Image: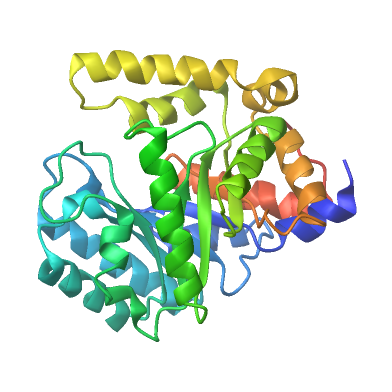
């Protein structure tokens, strides 16, 4: 492991949290351990309204969490799931409320539902409304899927990638990138980057990892792929999980098995030093405060060249 590459790479890592995670308390608790969260750190926020049956009132929690993050000096990046919104006016109200509390970044997603609740099928359907053209918005992120998107077919993914690149080219005043789903195999990740480049992708990618043992990682995958779905979809989701595990290969199995995927982080750090397609590391938390604190503490060790147990 090239410690200098890793130290430099870890300085700008980003994190996923739940809208229920009290980041003032998290910052205080990790601070007591000597872990300082750099000003401007990005925290993407998973909204409870992505859960089936959640009432609209839970959307307020994301607005409140965003306001808290801004007050703490960080950058909230709310998740916007297209298939959850009934129309442009409903979406406009949410975006405006988030802008009003100081949000300047958004993650645009299609979302998990097979059938949309309204007029939006894909993330780009939201982007094309013009709501995210606002000059106050500095960053727009989209999702990337190194193992394929379980909610659609490759042809649709390729088409949407072209739409995202076209939107980015037309909005040069904004930082537009892809946040990848969890990956542990450097070779798989790089082959995916190469395939997207052949399809015309020019967006940088933030690689995604998750800390924890195999059970925790597959529980997270279970939540992403099969929770609350019909039996047939659950079976396909489990097969997808098995495929992800099998696809790690020799260069990824160690990071999949380890509590800290240090091999993957080190490889991304090394490649990012000369490959502009690869941007900073993004830590998925599984949405719990304990996991967020663990990610912050591990990244702090990476950034300061301290030993990391994995």
Judge whether 145 appears above or below 305 on screen: above
Pick the quarter of the image with the C terminus: top right
Give the answer, above or below, for where 3 lies relative to 191. Answer: below
Query: In this rendering, would 299 be left or right of 138?
Result: right
Splitting the image into 4 quarters, where does residue 127 fall?
bottom left
Which of the pair 310/241 is nearer the observer? Answer: 241
In this figure, which colouring scheme has been used for the structure?
rainbow
Query: Residue sitting at 54 percent across and 36 percent down?
Result: 146
Query: Would you place residue 233 above or below residue 260 in this image?
Result: above
Q: Nearer the viewer, residue 123 or 32?
A: 123
> How far from the left and from the top, in percent, is residue 262?
73, 37
Spot occupied by residue 85 in the image (x, y as percentages of width and height) = 15, 57
Left or right: residue 96 versus residue 116 is: right
Q: Is residue 138 above or below residue 211?
A: below
Quarter of the image where one finds residue 22? bottom left
- Give the quarter of the figure containing the N terminus: top right
Position of residue 279 measured from the top left corner of the image (x, y, whole percent): 66, 57
Residue at 56%, 67% (x, y): give it.
41
Q: Is residue 37 left or right of residue 105?
A: right
Q: Residue at x 67, y 55 (%)?
A: 277
Work out whether residue 304 can be spotted. Answer: no
């Amino acid at each position: 492991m090239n410690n200098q590459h890793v130290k430099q790479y870890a300085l700008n890592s980003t994190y996923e949290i739940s809208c229920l995670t009290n980041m003032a308390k998290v910052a205080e608790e990790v601070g007591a351990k000597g872990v300082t969260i750099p000003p401007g750190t990005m925290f993407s926020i998973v909204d409870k309204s992505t859960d089936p049956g959640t009432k609209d009132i839970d959307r307020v929690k994301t607005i409140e969490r965003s306001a808290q993050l801004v007050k703490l000096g960080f950058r909230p990046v709310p998740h916007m799931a297209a298939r959850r919104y009934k129309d442009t006016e409903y979406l406009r109200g949410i975006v405006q409320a988030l802008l009003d509390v100081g949000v300047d970044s958004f993650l645009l997603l299609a979302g998990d539902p097979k059938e949309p609740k309204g007029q939006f099928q894909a993330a780009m359907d939201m982007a094309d409304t013009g709501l995210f053209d606002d000059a106050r918005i500095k960053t727009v992120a989209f999702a990337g899927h190194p193992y394929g998107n379980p909610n659609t077919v490759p042809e649709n993914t390729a088409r949407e990638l072209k739409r995202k690149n076209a939107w980015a080219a037309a909005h040069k005043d904004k930082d537009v990138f892809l946040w990848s789903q969890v990956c542990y195999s450097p070779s798989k990740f790089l082959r995916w980057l190469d395939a997207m480049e052949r399809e015309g992708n020019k967006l940088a990618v933030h690689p995604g990892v998750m800390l924890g043992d195999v059970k925790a990682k597959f529980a997270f995958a279970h939540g992403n792929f099969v929770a609350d779905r019909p039996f047939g979809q659950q079976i396909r989701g489990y097969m997808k999980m098995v495929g992800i595990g099998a696809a790690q290969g020799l260069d990824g199995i160690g990071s999949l098995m380890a509590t800290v995927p240090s091999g993957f982080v080190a490889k991304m750090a090394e490649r990012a030093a000369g490959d502009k397609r690869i941007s900073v590391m993004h830590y998925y938390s599984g949405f719990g405060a304990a996991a967020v604190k663990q990610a912050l503490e591990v990244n702090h060790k990476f950034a300061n060249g301290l030993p990391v147990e994995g």
